[in-house]
Image: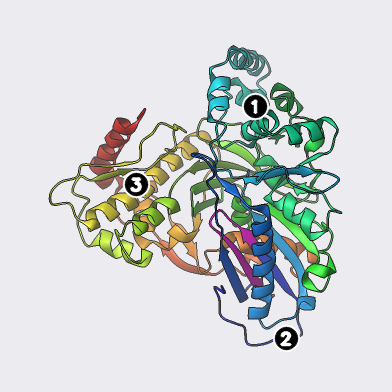
Amino acid sequence: MPCGQPGSGAAPALYVVGVDVGSTAVKCHVYDRAAAVRGSSCRKVESLYPRPGWVELDPEVLWSQFVGVIKEAVQAAGLHMRQVAALGISTQRSTFITWHKRTGKPFHNFISWQDVRSAELVNSWNRSLLLKVIHVIFTVLHFFTGNDRYLAPSFLTFSTQQTSMKLSWVFKNIPEADEAAKKNNCCFGTVDTWLLYRLTKGSVFATDYSNASSTGVFEPFTKCWNPTLCNLLSIPMSIYPPVKDTSFNFGSADPEIFGVPIPIMALVADQQSAMFGECCFQPGDVKLTMGTGGFWNVNTGGSLFASHRGLYPLIGWKIGEEVVYLTEGSVSNIGTTIKWAQDINLFTNVDETAKMARSIVDSQGVCFVPGFQASANNSYLCASFMGLKPTTTRNHLVRAILESVAFRNKQLFDIIVKKVRIPLQTVRADGGVSNNSFVMQMTSDLINKKIEKPSNTDMSSLGAAFLAGLASGLWTDKEQLKNLRRIEAVFEPQKDVKEYKPAMDTWMQAVKCSLHW
């Protein structure tokens, strides 16, 4: 199902392929030296829901889609596979699989980052006396040493989004995986590791620093898999892959797959990849991705900020000796909420939502509360509409949904300003929801910052291509990449934030009413 038009024909030049394996789609773009898209393809990711709260992906289906979009995109560009200089792979984070080291056979489907099967385990740990003891010990260590690496464990809490708890669930509930792990025959991999393993016919088992740091099992301060956490949860250290640079020669795809051995030159987690694609290379650069969820990332350079409630540190990328750290905050259910609204016929085309929201002066007191908030990952928060009246129309409902996105952006931005001790620069937005001018303008007003939107919002694909192109020599340095950026729109504050205060106060009250459902 091609998403782009075929190119004008093959040319005697080198190209780079960027693939983004996201939560809702697998997208592939073929880029030339000017970072222009020559051919594209995308396929919808079909999630599986075998039980309430379980979210899985079939590894064979995902593999077939991955290979398919690459072949389709190269064909759409009018190119031959031998003209591809490098392949860069961006993937959704924390979704993982385990498989047998000798046979390569998976013990289960991919368990998605959205999966909440570990909820009981999470709640049990968060109530445990042992966790309280850990909090006390690390609070004391932080007090006496002042070392920020002890700050995060001092208020450590587990959540269902973390890989660690779901991995612990696997070894408690899948005997074959547990037995193989005891014999050092079990491999753990996020989506990037599995695809690399399959591309190389099992000869390369590795991940990169951005994907590793996104699991919650990798310690960003020491840049190693966390043995303390693994011992605490009885997870064997032998299952983890070696961690390599983000822009790196990982080997080549087996020639049987594409007809030629395409070099695999980058593995990168999707949000970090979008950050790189936006050219947020300097400390203080900010990236806002609004896709399935919402992610705010701040480049903190060589400084690693410890976790604070609502924010967490990540490795953005590692290239040679350069290690760039990020601070991230996230909210769930942005794109998914808009898709749900479309599914229940609040609108027919997502492009019309901004016009619907602007067709009325306000939401008439109607508030939409999404499933999760920036300030608390509360699984008992009830998604709901509040303030409905006989005069409420579809336009009011749509506006309330879009306003909730902007309000949550404001919440998270305020936390970032308070906790990140780096002057923030221009915000650069991407993701499907960044195409909504109402959300973009309202967010700009609320945070009182200029927001740039690129002409191509598939930044994760572009970031992976940039990283692969640097490793292959297609591009020479980051300065060259900056010159390739194309900005489609700039949103500057037009209203004083005080004008939104009554509506946001009402929305905050609605959120409180929805807690502990």
Q: Is residue 186 visible?
A: yes
Q: Position of residue 421 (x, y in %)?
A: 55, 36
Q: Is residue 27 within the magenta segment?
A: yes
- Check contact, mark 2 vs mark 3: CB within 8 A: no
* Mark 2 secondary-structure assignment: loop
Q: Amino acid at mark 2?
A: Ala
Question: Observer-nearest residue: 476 or 296?
Answer: 296
What's drawn in magenta, residue-wise?
19-33
Q: Position of residue 191 (x, y in %)?
A: 68, 50
Location of residue 371 (image quadrant): top left
* Residue 148 numbered tag: 1
* Residue 11 numbered tag: 2
Task: Please give the name of the residue rendered at 27% of the width and 46% of the height, measured from the top-left corner.
Answer: 500
Q: Nearer the viewer, mark 2 or mark 1?
A: 2
* Residue on which disc 3 sits: 404
Q: Is residue 263 above or below residue 173?
A: below
Sequence-earlier tag: 1 or 3: 1
